[in-house]
């Protein structure tokens, strides 16, 4: 085993143990390999025929190489989207400074649903998208809206929804609408439709 591989193995083992994870490094790596295995069940003849007839896909699009290429592209796009969402967000300390409140108050506001935070896997750093702040204030009405954000909608979709003009709001974005004193119910109705897009 090379020194570099040993170092990564030792670091992974240490990280797993710090989190109280009873898995061995080998078992963890097996799970990762299983989750990222590009091989999937081959298409049946009927599925292949349907895709070729009902879509603009070609035989070349259905090859394992095309599948792998698409998987890599999707992973790259997902990483870029995550980076973009996190890049425009504020930390708890930054929100605390912006609003002139203590960090504990910011965390309570997040738990109460007054502030929207990006989902995190590590739980170490909470990030708050900047769109929810109007100057040194929180956009009014978010407490009624945030709990209705669909759970599986990407934060960038929510950001786009909240910051782009909407015909139902006289061409204003939900953030502009709420900041101008518009009815929260109008935005809540539109948020409910997000789940179906």
Image (cartoon, helix red, strand yellow):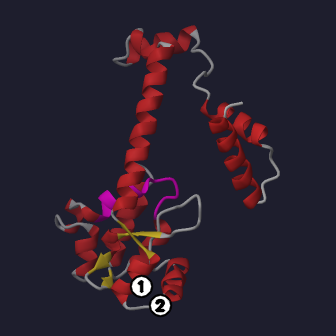
Q: Residue at x 47, y 67 (%)?
A: 148
Q: Please give the label number shown on residue 109.
A: none
Q: Are marks 2 and 1 in contact (CB under 8 Å)?
A: yes
- Horizontal side of 121 relative to 106 (left or right) equals right
Q: Horizontal and vertical percent for residue 83?
A: 39, 53
Q: Quadrant of the N terminus?
A: top right
Q: Residues within 10 Å of mark 1 (few under 14, many from 20)?
A: some
Q: Earlier in the sequence, mark 2 or mark 1?
A: 1
From mark 2 to mark 1, how far is it between C-alphas?
Answer: 6 Å
Relative to 14, residue 129 above or below? below
Q: Is residue 182 visible?
A: no
Q: Nearer the viewer, residue 36 or 117?
A: 36
Residue 43: quadrant of the picture:
top right
Task: Give the residue at the far left of this rendering.
Answer: 171
Residue for badge 1: 96
Write the start and end of the magenta stretch as one range. 149-162
Q: Residue at x 65, y 43 (%)?
A: 8
User: In what element is the residue under mark 1?
Assistant: helix
Q: Residues within 10 Å of mark 2 (few under 14, many from 20)?
A: few
Q: Horizontal and vertical percent for residue 81?
A: 38, 49
Residue 84: quadrant of the picture:
bottom left
- Horizontal side of 39 relative to 132 (left or right) equals right
Q: Residue at x 58, y 58 (%)?
A: 121
* Residue 145 part of the magenta segment: no
């Amino acid at each position: 085993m090379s020194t570099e591989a040993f170092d990564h193995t030792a670091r992974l083992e240490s990280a797993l143990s710090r989190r109280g994870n009873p898995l061995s490094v080998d078992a963890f790596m097996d799970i990762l390999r299983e989750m990222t295995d590009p091989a999937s069940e081959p298409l049946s003849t009927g599925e292949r025929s349907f895709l070729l007839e009902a879509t603009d896909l070609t035989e070349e699009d259905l090859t394992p190489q095309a599948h792998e290429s698409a998987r890599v592209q999707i992973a790259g796009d997902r990483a870029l989207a995550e980076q973009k969402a996190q890049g425009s967000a504020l930390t708890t300390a930054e929100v605390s400074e912006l609003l002139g409140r203590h960090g504990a108050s910011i965390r309570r506001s997040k738990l109460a649903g007054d502030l929207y935070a990006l989902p995190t896997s590590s739980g170490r750093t909470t990030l708050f998208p900047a769109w929810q702040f109007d100057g040194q204030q929180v956009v009014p009405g978010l407490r009624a809206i945030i709990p209705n954000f669909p759970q599986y909608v990407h934060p960038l979709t929510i950001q786009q929804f909240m910051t782009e003009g909407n015909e139902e709001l006289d061409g204003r974005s939900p953030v502009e609408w709420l900041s101008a004193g518009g009815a929260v119910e109008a935005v809540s109705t539109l948020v409910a439709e997000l789940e179906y897009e």
